[in-house]
Image (cartoon, rainbow, N blue to C red):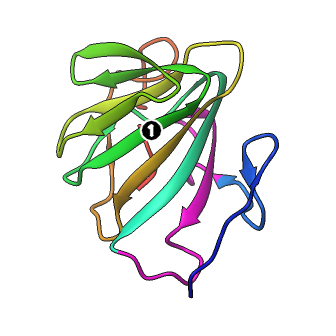
Amino acid sequence: MSKVLRFREGFSWEGIAPAPYKRETHTWKDVARHVLIGEGGETPRFHVRYFEVAPDGWTTLETHRHEHVVVVMRGRGEVRLGDRTEPISFGDVVYVAPSDVHQFRCAGGEPFGFLCLVNAERDPPKPVRGGGVSGSGAAGGER
């Protein structure tokens, strides 16, 4: 059934509750996940999620066989792609190629938010050592 998800002040959507980023918590810090399309009875070949990373937060440093696209909607951040790190901000688009190591971090005093478009059918992510705030542990995105 077709629908409209109404955007609300504070980067939320009517009827969409934020969920934990992942079950385990040792590979990431201060990340919320909002599944906009893909878990509400729709049957697309893709999922659309909004992730919000709080100041000083980061996603899991990870790799997986599937590709995905990120569109920055709020704040400033950094994306690690392999061995390089790039600053990103509103309107920037990031393509994460299959099997590339990647991670997203908030780089400002306000939350860093982005839409993530990914195949509905995908492999689970694998954490990679070297993420986290001090460069130890593992850290990237939700499956």
Residue 38 position in % (x across, y down): 49, 71
Magenta-span inclusion, residue 1: no
Magenta span: chief secondary structure:
loop
- The quadrant in which residue 6 appears is bottom right
Quadrant showing the N terminus = bottom right
In this rendering, does residue 24 appear at all?
no
Residue 34 position in % (x across, y down): 63, 55
Q: Is 112 situated left or right of 135 in this image? A: right
Seen as rendered, the residue at the extreme right is 9
Q: Is 80 situated left or right of 47 in this image? A: left
Q: What residue is drawn where x is 50% and y is 81%?
A: 42
In this rendering, does residue 85 appear at all?
yes
Disc 1 marks a residue whose amino acid type is Val
Q: What residue is drawn where x is 22% and y is 24%?
A: 82
Quadrant showing the C terminus = bottom left
Q: How many marks can you see?
A: 1
Q: Is the residue 103 above or below the residue 13 in the image?
A: above
Residue 92 position in % (x across, y down): 41, 27
Provide the residue span drawn in magenta.
20-44
- The quadrant in which residue 71 appears is top left
Q: Secondary structure at mark 1?
A: strand
Which residue is denoted by mark 1 in the rendering? 71
- Report crowding for label 1: few under 14, some 14 to 19, many 20 or more residues within 10 A (C-alpha): some
